[in-house]
Amino acid sequence: MKDPSLDLLVLTDLHYIHTAEDTCAIEKRRCELGPALIRAAFQESQKTGFQPDALILLGDLVNNGLAPGAAQDLAEIAQAARETGLPLLALPGNHDGDVATFVATFDSPAGLYEIGGVGLILLYDRVAAGDVTTRPEETLALPGQIARQRPELPLIALQHNPLHPYIEAEYPYMPTNVDRILESYCEASVLLSLSGHYHSGQPAHQVGPTTYCTLPATCEAPFPYAQVRIHGRTVEIEQRALDGRL
């Protein structure tokens, strides 16, 4: 049997503002670039010989999804993503506003997607006031359920918030029940966990069976994105930058 093989192009935290009645006071966030960043990452990947099987967007795609006009900005991001011709998986971050609008725009509801013999799980967490995030019980159980039903399937968990290593900060970057999430990934032998949200990023590292990686924000110089390669149970993550290519 052929080993599972999957190449992913991954971006996160675009914080796009165009039509939305919104401004961003953080100067280093280039909120006007969103669609251009997607196009540039795809074009550069092709030039370097990396042929992704899917495009992954890990949330905070607009800067304020509740602002008037933000739905149109989300639609522009979705259009740029679909122009690549790649299968698209996108999940909402805490900035993206109404989840139903997000799902309708990107047509990627939470759950399992299978590409190239690999299972990708889109995990939507619950965001409360102050950006306090918690994983619901039914979502906590999902990786284990999938692993029991499909033990041959390598699993990649996709969520917005970082999970490991622990971040000591006043702002709640990590889910309130992060320890239980880590336990659920270990029990399900999740191969790879990819997150965004923490704009500095966290390098790839392994804990038990799982490689954890928090990708840095694509909207901030040097405008990073990732090329992820899965072959069997081998994971390779190359972080690249678009600085000077926009």
Image (cartoon, rainbow, N blue to C red):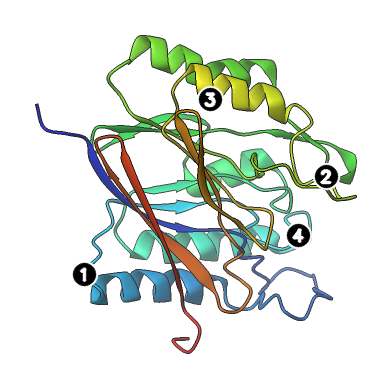
Identify the residue position indicated by label 1 in the image.
Answer: 49
Seen in the picture, residue 115 relative to 35 is either above or below; the reply is: above
- Secondary structure under the numbered disc 1 in the rendered image: loop
Residue 29 in view of the camera = yes
On the picture, is 151 further left or further right than 94?
left
Secondary-structure class at tag 3: helix
Picture quadrant of residue 134 = top right
Q: Are marks 1 and 4 in contact (CB under 8 Å)?
A: no
**Circle 3 residues within 10 Å: few <14, some 14–19, many ≥20:** many
Tell me the SS state at disc 4.
loop
Near mark 4 (Cα within 10 A), the count class, few <14, some 14-19 or many ≥20, is many
Residue 185 numbered tag: 3
Name the amino acid, label 2: Pro
Residue 30 rendering spot, x and y as whole percentages: 66, 78
**Amino acid under disc 3:** Tyr
Residue at the spot 70% in from the left edge and 75% down from the top edge: 29
Q: Earlier in the sequence, mark 2 or mark 3?
A: 2
Identify residue for label 2.
172
Q: Is residue 173 above or below residue 84?
A: above
Q: Earlier in the sequence, mark 4 or mark 2?
A: 4
Q: Earlier in the sequence, mark 3 or mark 4?
A: 4
**Which residue occupies the extreme bottom position in the image?**
244
Q: Nearer the viewer, residue 107 or 16?
A: 16
For the point 65% across and 44% down, which residue is it?
A: 162
Q: Earlier in the sequence, mark 1 or mark 2?
A: 1
State whether residue 204 is above or below residue 189.
below
Q: Residue 51 occupies which quadrant of the picture?
A: bottom left
Can you give x and y, in whole percent of width and height, for residue 164 in the image? 64, 41
Task: Give the mark nearest the N terminus, 3 or 1.
Answer: 1
Q: Which residue is mark 4?
A: 64
